Image (cartoon, rainbow, N blue to C red):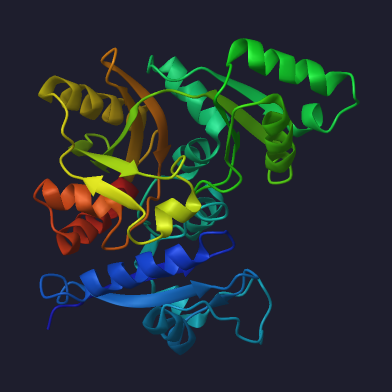
Amino acid sequence: MVNKMRVGLLFGGRSGEHEVSISSAKAIAKALKSEQNADKYEVLPFYIQKDGLWQGGEKAQQVLDSGVPQQFASDGNLWQFPTQAESVEVWFPILHGPNGEDGTIQGLLSLMQVPFVGSGVLGSAVGMDKIAMKTAFASAGLAQVKYMAINRSQVWSNPCVFPKLCDEIEAKLGYPCFVKPANLGSSVGIAKVRSRTELEKALDNAASYDRRLIVEAGVQAREVECAVLGNDNPQASVVGEITYNSDFYDYETKYTEGKADLFIPANIPPNVAAQIQEMAVKAFVALDAAGLGRVDFFYVEATGEVLINEINTLPGFTSTSMYPQLWAHSGISFPELTDKLIQAALERHKS
């Protein structure tokens, strides 16, 4: 009898993407119990409730099976881990958004001195903060759309400062432009604006979510994505494209069945696809990302330009998510992908 490796599947979390995290965990658990992985791994589920309390054992399994968030009555304090946590040999965190892919949980797992899937503290933190991320991309020489970094204090300031800020945005970026909180995942708090009134409203709204904001120039482009896998010598997948009928790729479009279409591989010239793959790997390395990442780009067909948009260090991992689908089209099945990610975690921990 071979000893199975105990995988701590960590899901739920304190972000707006709690439900998506449960769906991702469900798909990963299924893949780890599939025929090719069943002899290698034993899945130990750990559920982080919306209030931050950790649950293991039967309670975590209940959430995983039902796919529905639950709030169990607290019988311990917030900082106590379920007893099963002690026996975990490798963690598989699949917590999207703040408190999950921003370096905080990665710091905790690093302190536990147990290998974990995905980027470490640095790559996660830089990948989550859109301003820090764009600064890293710029220093790596990656082309991107024009943008401005703004603080909440500038938005919620005296009546003289705010109009000047809006003047500057109009002069530098023009309309349409996008207003985004710097640190929220999944298109939360993002608005596409076309006038001064919309801009003022969007800045005020985004400031209610985050201290740091970013405003980006709008661009007429196709939205393409590339998945990256590995550590020091990462590989890029085929390139996929997202199309949708809504105004932009917002939360509802992203997570409602049938609202967006994925085309894999994207119908783009081979040299453009190669350029996107090269840029995806470059971005991954620039952030010191590890394990997995999905890099999103704008392909401006009229000029042939490729502009990097962002990296996602813990992308959605459901069976319909772009990341596993890109690898499936590149010849790596979902179960094989989960295995490779765990192996990458073990390899990085050793080094």
- Direction from residue 4 to residue 1 in the image, left or right: left
Of residue 58 and residue 169, the one placed in the foreground of this image is: 169
Horizontal and vertical percent position of residue 284:
34, 33
**Residue 24 locus on image (x, y percent):** 36, 64
Indicate the quadrant containing the C terminus: top left, top right, bottom left or bottom right. top left
Residue 9, how many percent across, how many down?
A: 38, 69
* Picture quadrant where residue 204 is located: top right
Kindly identify the residue that appears in the image at 41 percent across and 52 percent down.
254
- The image quadrant where one finds the N terminus is bottom left
Q: Nearer the viewer, residue 107 or 284?
A: 284
Query: Is 188 on the left or on the right of 157, as rendered?
Result: left
Q: Position of residue 272 (x, y in %)?
A: 19, 22
Name the quadrant containing residue 175: top right
- Residue occupying image coordinates x 61% and y 11%: 172
Please state which of residues 95 and 205 is positioned toward the viewer in this rendering: 205
- Residue found 15% across the figure and 40% down from its top: 265
Residue located 38% across and 71% down the image: 88
